[in-house]
Image (tube, rainbow, N blue to C red):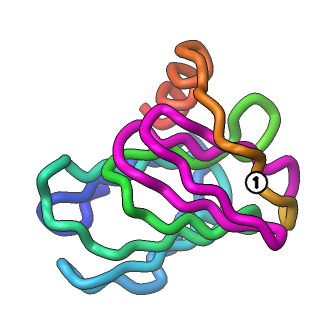
Amino acid sequence: MRLGEDTTIRLGERAHLVIDQFLLATTGEISLESGPMLYDRPSGSRRVPMQIRSSYALIAVRGTRFFAGPSNGVFGVFAEEGTVVVSGGGGEVTLQAGQGTNLASPGSMPTAPVLWGKERISAAFASVQ
């Protein structure tokens, strides 16, 4: 799915995504109701404030490419490029490129940022091919 000229969202099998609000080049809010997604915005393109809501977390997009969805039996968020802020369960973490976090259940706090291994990253990205 393309949002404007610069942003691509890839959805995995059985993903359910609702575009709550999207004003081209201004702002956006998306609800990820189920399944995995990959948000991809080329580096160097104009940054647009974007929020992704799910039952697990609120994801504030400052990054250009990140994954959110089922991963290793939990809801995972991984920042491949840029910065992503993940809020849930009264806590918040900021992910830098190469870092991920886990949310065990809806309403739980995100874990501290950690580097994800190549296998987990590959499996996450394969789920949205």
The quarter in which the C terminus is drawn is top left
- For residue 34, which quarter of the picture? bottom right
Residue 70: x %, y % from top left: 69, 41
Viewer-proximal residue, 58 or 90?
90
Residue 64: x %, y % from top left: 31, 51
Q: Secondary structure at mark 1?
A: loop
Three-letter amino acid code of the residue under disc 1: Pro
Q: In this rendering, would 112 be left or right of 86?
A: right
Eyeballing the image, is 56 above or below 23? above
| Secondary structure mostly seen in the magenta stretch | strand
In the image, which residues are magenta?
Answer: 76-105
Q: Is residue 29 magenta?
A: no
The quarter in which the N terminus is drawn is bottom left
Eyeballing the image, is 126 above or below 10? above
Q: Which residue is mark 1?
A: 110
- For residue 62, which quarter of the picture? bottom left
